[in-house]
Amino acid sequence: MSQEIRNLEPKALWNKFADLNQVPRPSKKEDKVIEFMKDFGKSLGLETFEDEIRNVIIRKPATPGMENRKGIVLQGHLDMVCQKNNSTEFDFDTQGIDMYVDGDWVRARGTTLGADNGLGVATIMAILESKDIPHPAIDALFTIDEETGMTGALNLKGGVLQGEILLNLDTEEDDEIDIGCAGGIDVTATRAYKLEEVPEGSVGYSINVRGLNGGHSGMDINKGLGNANKIMNRLLFDGFENFGLQVAEINGGSLRNAIPRESVAQVIVAGMYDEAFAFDMQEIINDIKAEYRTMEPNLTIEINKTDLPAQVMDLGVQEGLLRALYAAHNGVYRMSPDMADLVETSNNVARVIVKEGQITVQCLTRSSVESSKFDLANALRSAFELMGCEVNFSGSYPGWTPNVNSPILKVLTDIYQKQNGEAPKVVACHAGLECGILGTNYPGMDMISFGPTIHGAHSPDERASISSSQKFWKFVLEILQNIPTKE
């Protein structure tokens, strides 16, 4: 890690981020970072504990003169999305993130940076450690498994938190104040299939889709980015329709909350179609690359001859799968009729695995409207059930309904206006913030979400703006001084 990171301003924030990023913290593997955070709180002599699900809570009393202010909850999540480039050798379970400075940006070498939500967590740590920042009584809430199930927020019981106001530090544009978010549900389709022997006279091919931008499957879903699973399916569908292509394996995408960047398939065609198949595929590749030339200039699609696989899919099941994947909606399903430019409902066809007699397709469906969320989830279920899959819904969590009359919203908008000479954008986001979930057990809590500018979250292109972090830090400090008094 570059020492430059620790010399950035504000040093209190960047040093805590550097410390945090040396601790492995993949989603569902947070043991090390939980112990790190508990040791940190105890080292400060603050009340520190974990709840039944392993969220960490650290309490800090109000500074002198602030005892009459409402108590606040400063909240961030401990886990991070672990994505890397194929060419990068990196073990997220054991290694710390390798960071460097690139102009106004902090980046990681070939991996996600962990600024989502590491910068928010580091901000809270810096405030807890400080001796000269005025603030009311603080409950610092560090949740687990936000990225792959919202497990920490979903299992936080009522009565644990003492604050009346929650400041969630987990959004990614520094001129926005968030007052609402989408809920989500995992849609998983599975089916077994019979393996068939490879016909004599067949030719083996590998198809590789790579070089896509990827990105956050909520915040970036409206950008027209390429989805490697859908692109691969176009190629396979055409090859099957015109040349009887048969699939041996497919391995596409990674995490539900990341737009798929890569997909690899092993296929066969009859030797008699060899030249025609290669020519036709190149025509389709040229068309796809032309379609995506603006948004995905680095898209690469390669088709190469390989050794024949041992076995291939049953043709009947294969046809059903390719048609179901074609029918499965990907991208924006409905825009909000109430908030301009807000995606209401969307789906990400995140993961497609075909191997050794088993099909698995994983999607993440998001919506700020519960009925619309299940409408799209049922449409996906129908497509996959028609080809014989078993479809399960899991991990459902609610959205966060905007409250334009929120008292803490007025505090933040007034401070932002004073500091920046213009009003902030008051928005709702198409991502799964924890506020809506936390609000189910704390219905009277006034909630707001904001954060520094982070681009490329959930991809190896993730980067955090240095100047924005300075702006964000100044904003946070003044918010702490202006928390309303108790009623």
Image (spheres, rainbow, N blue to C red):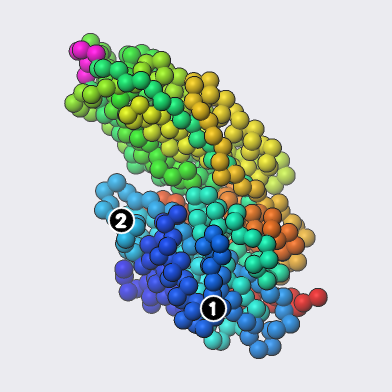
Residue drawn at x 31%, y 62% is 95
Which mark, residue 128? Answer: 1
Q: Residue 102, how many percent across, how many down?
A: 36, 64
Q: How many marks?
A: 2
Magenta stretch prevailing secondary structure? loop
State the residue at coordinates (56%, 41%): 394
The residue tagged with tag 1: helix, strand or loop? helix
Residue kind at label 2, given as amino acid type: Asp
Instruction: Residue at 31% x, 70% y: name it.
Output: 2
Q: Is residue 473 left or right of residue 437?
A: left
Left-right relation of 1 to 65:
left
Q: What residue is at 61 percent from the left and 72 percent from the top?
A: 139
Q: Which quarter of the rendered picture does the N terminus lie within?
A: bottom left
SS class of the residue under badge 2? loop
Marks 1,2: beta carbons within 8 A: no
Instruction: Report if residue 172 is visible in the image.
Output: no
Return the residue found at the far bottom: 64
| Residue range (magenta) | 199-203
Point out residue 29 in the picture as x, y percentages from the top left corner. 42, 57
Q: Which mark is first along the chain, 2 or 1? A: 2
Residue 444 on the magenta segment: no
Q: Residue furthest right?
A: 487
Residue 345: quadrant of the picture: top right
User: Which residue is identified by label 2?
Assistant: 91
- Viewer-side residue, 410 vs 102: 410
In the rendered image, the vertical position of residue 323 relative to residue 358, given as above or below: above
Q: Position of residue 377 (x, y in %)?
A: 59, 34
- Location of residue 420 by image quarter: bottom right
Q: Amino acid at mark 1?
A: Leu
